[in-house]
Amino acid sequence: MSSLKKANKALGYIIIGIAILWFCYLGASYLDYKLHYDEYLTTSFPWYAGAILYGYLALGLVLVLTILKLILKRKMRSK
């Protein structure tokens, strides 16, 4: 297997990992909200704000990695 194929496959796994981690964070945030509902009543910060922030960061990373994957595929086709 060439190094370009290995890099392409690794980028695919990283993208999937980022998505899984974000969904796990979202689930953990919701669980924390359900377990500590009284604490969230005293703040104006909604329970899902962190998930939205990390979601935007994850989306940015996924976009950059997807562009890298497309560049690698184009290089693999040209060889």
Image (tube, rainbow, N blue to C red):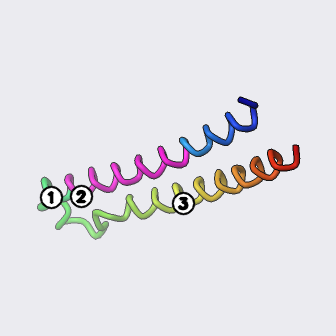
> Quadrant of residue 37 in the image?
bottom left
Residue under the image location 54 percent in, 41 percent down = 13
Amino acid at dot 3: Leu
Q: State the quadrant of the C terminus.
A: top right
Residue occupying image coordinates x 70% and y 37%: 5
1 vs 3, front mark: 3
> Tag 2: residue type?
Tyr
Q: Which residues are magenta?
A: 14-32
Sequence order check: which comes first, mark 2 or mark 3? 2
Query: Which of the two labelled residues, at mark 1 and mark 3, occupies the earlier sequence position?
Result: 1
Q: Is residue 67 left or right of residue 28?
A: right
Residue 47 lies left or right of residue 3; in this view the side is left
- Residue positioned 54% across, 60% down in the render: 59
Quarter of the image that includes the N terminus: top right
Q: Residue 33, image x and y in percent? A: 20, 58
Q: Which residue is mark 1?
A: 34
How much space separates mark 1 and mark 3, taking CA atoms?
A: 26 Å
- Mark 1 and mark 2 residues within 8 Å of each other at the beta carbon: yes
Give the Cα separation between the discs numbered 1 and 2: 6 Å
Q: In the image, is residue 22 part of the stretch drawn in magenta?
A: yes
Residue located beneath label 2 in the image: 30
The answer to whether marks 2 and 3 mark residues whose Cβ atoms lie closer than 8 Å is no
Judge the density around disc 2: few (<14), some (14-19), many (≥20) Cα neighbours within 10 Å: some
Tell which residue pokes out farthest to the bottom in this image. Answer: 44
Query: Is 32 drawn above or below residue 10 in the view shown?
Result: below
The residue carrying pointer 3 sits among few (fewer than 14), some (14 to 19) or many (20 or more) residues within 10 Å by Cα, namely some
Instruction: Residue 67: give x, y in percent of width and height.
Output: 70, 56
On screen, residue 10 above or below 28: above
Q: Name the residue type under label 1.
A: Lys
Residue located beneath label 3 in the image: 59
